[in-house]
Amino acid sequence: MFYPKAIINLDNLAHNYRLIKDQLNNIPIMAVVKANAYGHGVIEISKVLRNEGVKFFAVFTFNEALELRDAGITEDILVFCRPTKQMLDIAFEKDITLNLCDPDDVRLFCEANHSPKFHLKVDTGMTRLGISFNEVYKIIETIKNEKLNCHGIYSHYATADEGDLSYAEYQLDQFNELLEFLEKINLTVKFIHFSNSGTVINMPHSSYNLVRVGMLLYGSFPSDEVPRDLSIKPVMEFKGPVVSLRKVKAGTKVSYGGVWEANEDTVIGVVQTGFADGFPRGWYMNGFISLRGNKHPIAGRVCMDQFMVDFGDAEVEVGDEVLIFGQNEVDKILVDDIAKDIGSTSYVILTGIRGRTERKYIN
């Protein structure tokens, strides 16, 4: 049968984790495995990381946390979304850590039958979820007075993966000011975290005692503005099968809109993978695939289920699998480079792998 494949190299995942751990001088890592581990498969990824020594995981939705618990992941799990009343008793029962990120959330935890653990999220400049800086001092005093089960405090950078770090440093200054207040009122929290994949590389002084890492674990850099000094390896190899080949004459138009036409007589191959499966549609303009170490240009607009390739006079057969992105013994196309070319991000591309794509796990 013909279908796209996402081959997940678990050895590369372990390699990346160890590399990042060394970079952080063994500060504990909270592995961010939200959105199905950035498209890689949350259960398999989490089990490998647990076996490597990861004791902290982060997801976005409460259902993602329950999925990990049901799969036997017993380590700490932090849920990033805003909590609801329905979550609290279950979170307490299953030892899931919630996110106190709005002034109204305090009432939820005060009124709970059994208050679960939570981390207090502070907005230092992202203007997303998080207690605003002008309200957080009052909230902290309430947490102390009510003896709520606050296990951590954290914030999120808006620009830590960009070349100009001045705004990130401003956020860090605010956060440090808040930590001084905690010390002043004698409120101790177990975990303090602010760093993410970007700051692992370019702001190591903001690591505290826990570091959230997502994209770097999966072998991609958070943006094209950070140094690529870490020798991380792509974890996902995204491939599609050639299902049809035909010889065409020079001038033949290919795909929707007829925007691409053959410059000379050539062979056009149809690859059974489309944007419904996660192929980055904008990649057709300058895009290419790789087969047996050779690059071949994409011919025309990508379709929902298929795309076409100009193979020229290359040796290619129906059933061959072309590399769309990733790395193997002979072929390499970095998702970071695709993202830069089409004005997107690696996050968007990796989490978009879906549809008929089969995930295959290898060591």
Image (cartoon, rainbow, N blue to C red):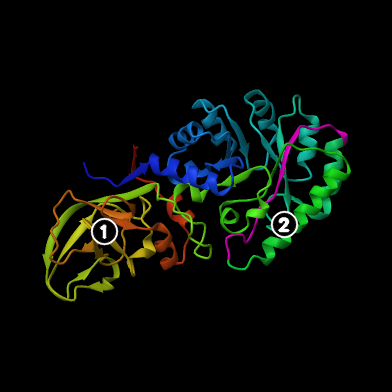
Quadrant of image for the C terminus: top left
Residue 226 is situated, as x and y percent measured from the top left of the image, at 53, 62
Is 243 inside the magenta-drawn segment? no
Residue 359 is situated, as x and y percent measured from the top left of the image, at 35, 40
Q: Which residue is mark 1?
A: 290
Q: Quadrant of residue 40?
A: top left
* Left or right of residue 118: residue 23: left
| Residue type, numbered disc 1 | Ser
* Left or right of residue 70: residue 158: right
Q: Which residue is nearer to you in this view: 139 or 274?
A: 139
| Residue type, numbered disc 2 | Leu
Q: Residue at x 36, y 55 (%)?
A: 279
Question: Height in image: 114 above or below 195?
Answer: above
Q: Which residue is nearer to you in this view: 295 or 207?
A: 207
Q: Residue at x 58, y 64 (%)?
A: 162
Residue 139 appears in the figure: no
Residue 52 appears in the figure: yes
Question: Height in image: 272 above or below 48?
Answer: below
Residue 44 is situated, as x and y percent measured from the top left of the image, at 43, 34
Q: Nearer the viewer, mark 1 or mark 2?
A: 2
Q: From the image, give the main secondary structure of the stretch colored magenta.
A: loop
- Label 1 to label 2, Cα distance in Å? 43 Å
Pointer 2: residues within 10 angstroms few (<14), some, or many (20+)? many
What span is colored magenta in the figure? 145-162
Question: Height in image: 165 above or below 157?
Answer: below
As helix, strand or loop, the secondary structure at mark 1 comes to strand
Q: Residue at x 30, y 50 (%)?
A: 328
Give the label on residue 24, or none: none
Q: Earlier in the sequence, mark 1 or mark 2?
A: 2
Q: Quadrant of residue 339?
A: bottom left
Q: Which residue is mark 2?
A: 172
